[in-house]
Each structure stands twice: as structure tokens, then as C-alpha cells.
Amino acid sequence: MSLPLEGLSAIVTGAGRGLGRAEALELAGLGASVVVNDFGQPGRDGSGEASAAPAEEVAAEIRDAGGRATAHTGDVADHEQARALVATAVETYGKLDILVNNAGILRDRMIFSMTESEWDAVVRVHLKGHFNTTRFASAHWRERAKAAGGPVYGRIVNTSSEAYLAGSAGQPNYAAAKGGIVGLTTSTALALAKYGVTANVICPRARTRMTEDVFQGFQEPAGDELDPLAPEHVAPLVGYLASPAAADVSGQLLVVHGGMVALMERPKVAARFDAAGDTLTYAELDALLTPYYAKHPEGFAATEVLTLRRG
């Protein structure tokens, strides 16, 4: 019996550790040939010397398990290095079928203290990094579709965050970048639909190097029990979205963690207020909106998407 991703090739960015590693192993286990991309800097803030070791170790792990994998150590936030990453997949495996964007860094700071460089660095790696790889992967699929005279196989899985959905006071750069990734994904899904390409975005919750301080209050289970925050809970959804089974799934936002997936709706109207005349005045807005928010103080920003039980 063939595997669902047999004969397909994939790129996973930020795949040297954490979520990216789990996703690369999942895709390889489902039969895909994988380009394991990781710039290899040790600091979660993007600091330290870049190293080939993380990407090479994961690629070796896949090969040792009988799969096909090659390491790529370029910086996806660099336009030309992202071009080279896509070219590596095409040259090594003949084509690219799946792109999983996961690479990112953190530089947390309150909005009133954040520096320009802290803002730029996070937006560069997350949002520009997603754009760069998507730009070259989508051009590859468009060219293939034109040559074939019809749709081809293409899957994009992007990575957002609940920091975008529910807010994160100390991460304005990260939350903004993750929100931008959602917009990039839905736009990409519309643009590439006629070529047979799908694009979806996930908000994963997992215990990784990036989130080690966020989940300090949530105890890890003892013994052989799988941590509900383990990246292994996220990887199967990525495998599914990358597969032929998800051909009709595109432009979607899904939250995933601990054995559950939540499909998020697009924003919808909560209430509507109409002018008595041709246009709303300040006094009329005050009379309409102030009482409404007095009764609904939770608002949009305070919405709780999911809950975790503390150990």
C-alpha cells in the first residue's frame, strides 16, 4: 500500500528543531522527500552563529529511518536564499509539491519599549520569510501549470499563532507578523486556486524552544505519557493539509494542539448600528456604541480562543 505523500517533495523551513522538526519527520513518514531548512542560529531571538548542524541532523534522522532528505541552511528571510531553497528542492527531487513555512524568531518587548530593530527582525523572519518562499514556490507551480495546460499539485501550510487571534501584550511585533501571515495565506489561496494549489494556515500550540517560558506553569507529564503540548500533536495536521485528501481545503485557519483541531471562522459582524439620517454623528455614535460596549466589555481583543489546564 502506497503512502499518501509518496512521490511528492516538500520543503519545511525552521525544521532543525521543535515544530519544524516534527513536521519534517511527519511528512517523511508519509512518504515525502524533504528539504530540511534551518538557518541554525542557537538563540530563539535569532542571535548566535548560524550552524548547519540542526538541519543536517534532522535530514540524517529521516535518511536513517529509510526516507529521503537533504539539508538546506539558508536564511528564508533573504530573498535570494529563499529562491535557492526552492531551486534546491526542484533540482534534487525534480519538482516541489509541498511548502511548509515554520521558521521564526522572538524578540519580545512591550510596545512602548520596543526598538525599531526588534520590530524589523521579527517581521523580517516571519512575514517576509513566508512571502519569500511562497513567491518562488508559487512561480514554480504557475510555470508547471502553464506547461501542463492545467492544474498541478501544490500545497502550502503556513504558521500563524494564537498571539494573532487573542493578542499578546509583550509581542506586538510577533502578533502583527502572524496576523500578516494569515492575510498572506488567504490571498495566496485565492491567487493559486486555478493552478491547483492550496494554501492554509495553522495556529499551533506546542512546547518548544520558542515557547519554553510561555508554558512554564503547565507541567509535563511523567513517564511515557505524551505531553499535551508536544509538537507531535501538531505534525499530523500538517501532513493532512499537505496530502491529496485535502484537495478541497484552502484558505483555512486552524488551531491545533493536544489532540484537537479547531477550525476558525472568518471575522463576522457582531452588531450593526445605522444612522437615523444620511451619516452618523458623534452624538449618535456615543448613544449607540457606549451602551453596547458597557454591556459587552469583553470586546474582540479579550476573546479566549482555547484554554489549557494547569498542572
Image: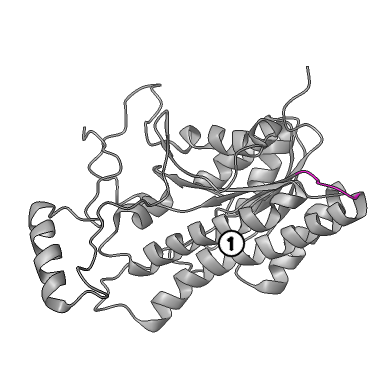
Along the line of sight, the residue nearer the viewer: 284 or 145:
284
- Considering the numbered disc 1 on the image, is that residue within a helix, a strand or a loop? helix
| Image position, residue 82 (x, y; %) | 69, 66
| Image position, residue 179 (x, y; %) | 43, 61
- Left or right, 25 with reference to 263: right
| Residue 103 visible (yes or no) | yes
Residue 276, placed above or below residue 40: below
Determine the residue positioned at 13% across, 64% down.
288
In the picture as drawn, the residue positioned furthest to the front comes out as 277
Quadrant of residue 227 in the image? top left
Determine the residue positioned at 25% across, 71% down.
110
Segment tinted magenta in the rendering: 149-153
| Image position, residue 229 (x, y; %) | 38, 36
Q: Amino acid at mark 1?
A: His
In the picture as drawn, the residue positioned furthest to the top comes out as 1
| Residue 74 visible (yes or no) | no
Residue identifier under label 1:
130
Residue 180, placed above or below residue 259: below
Mark 1 crowd level (few <14, some 14–19, many ≥20, 10 Å Cα):
many
In the picture as drawn, the residue positioned furthest to the bottom comes out as 116
Looking at the rendered image, the quarter that the N terminus falls into is top right
Along the line of sight, the residue nearer the viewer: 271 or 185:
271
Q: Is residue 152 magenta?
A: yes
Q: Magenta span: helix, strand or loop, mainly?
A: loop
Determine the residue positioned at 70% across, 55% down.
192
Q: Is residue 290 magenta?
A: no
- Left or right, 66 with reference to 13: right
Looking at the rendered image, the quarter that the C terminus falls into is top left
